[in-house]
Image (cartoon, rainbow, N blue to C red):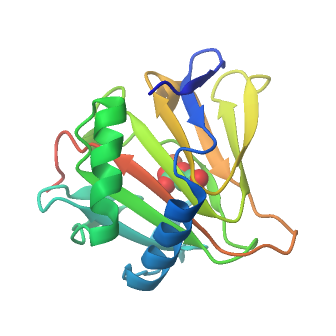
Amino acid sequence: MVLDVIPLPDAQLQFDPHWLGPLEADALLDGLHRDVPWETHRIRIFGREVDSPRLSCWIGDPDARYRYSGTLFEPHPWPDALVPVRERLERTLDVAFNSVLANLYRDGTDAMGWHSDAEPELGPAPVIASISLGATRRFALKHRDDPARKLTLELPHGSLLVMSGATQRHYRHALPRTTRPIGPRINLTFRRIVTPSR
Ligand SMILES: O=C(O)CCC(=O)C(=O)O
Ligand SMILES: [Fe+2]
C-alpha cells in the first residue's frame, strides 16, 4: 500500500486520511477509550513539573522502557484491540514497532505543546506512525531554524501520519488547543525503542 507523500523540506511525511475504515476506526476508538488505563502524566515545562493537559498511557513490549519529559515509563501490556493494528502497521511500513504512546484529548482544551520525538531511545532517524481517532484536530509542524517552514494538517478519524527520516531532527510539532466545541480524540504514536532506558 502506498501512502501519499506530503512535501516539506528537511522532513519526510506520509499521510493517508482513511487508513482505517470508518467502522474499524469507530470500534478502535470505543475499545481504547474504555479499556486503556488512562493516566495523567507529569511533564516538565521550564523546569517545573505539571500535569499534562491530556490523558496518556505508555504501551509496549516489556523491555520498551522510555524516558519522556524527565519520567521513566514502564510499558503497559498491549490491549487486544491494538494487536492487529500494530501488525498492519509493521507490514505497511516494514518497521518492528515495539511501543505506542496513547493520548486521549478529552475536549478542545486538552492539547500537546511544541516538541520533537527525539529521545535517544528512538535512535537518530525514528519512524513515528501516528493514528488519529475521534474528533478531527489540527496538527502543526514548525522548522527549528527557519520559522517560515511550517505546515498544519487536519488529522481525521482513521487517519495515519508517518513522520520519518530527519523530521524529528529538524522540526517540532504540536497539537494546539481549540475553542471549537469538540468531542474526544485518541492519538496513537507507534514507536520503536532501539535502546531501552534503564
Ligand atoms: O496527538 C497528536 O496528534 C500528536 C501526539 C504527539 O506528538 C506525541 O504523542 O508525541
Ligand atoms: Fe510527538
**Occupied quadrant, residue 172:** top right
Whether residue 190 is visible to the viewer of this picture, yes or no, is: yes
Would you say 135 lies left or right of 96 here?
right
Q: Horizontal and vertical percent for residue 115?
A: 56, 46
Quadrant of the image for the N terminus? top left
Quadrant of the image for the C terminus? bottom left
Would you say 184 lies left or right of 95 here?
right
Judging depth in this view, the residue of 93 and 123 nearest the camera is: 93
Q: Horizontal and vertical percent for residue 141?
A: 67, 37
Whether residue 126 is visible to the viewer of this picture, yes or no, is: no
**Occupied quadrant, residue 64:** bottom left
Would you say 44 lies left or right of 113 here?
left
Q: Horizontal and vertical percent for residue 74?
A: 21, 68
Residue ID at (57%, 54%)? 158
Residue ID at (38%, 82%)? 35
* Residue 174 higher or lower than 72, as above or below: above
Residue ID at (35%, 53%)? 85
Q: Horizontal and vertical percent for residue 119?
A: 35, 43
| Numbered marks: total | 0
Q: Residue furthest top?
A: 9
Would you say 22 lies left or right of 182 here?
left
* Residue 18 higher or lower than 147, as above or below: below
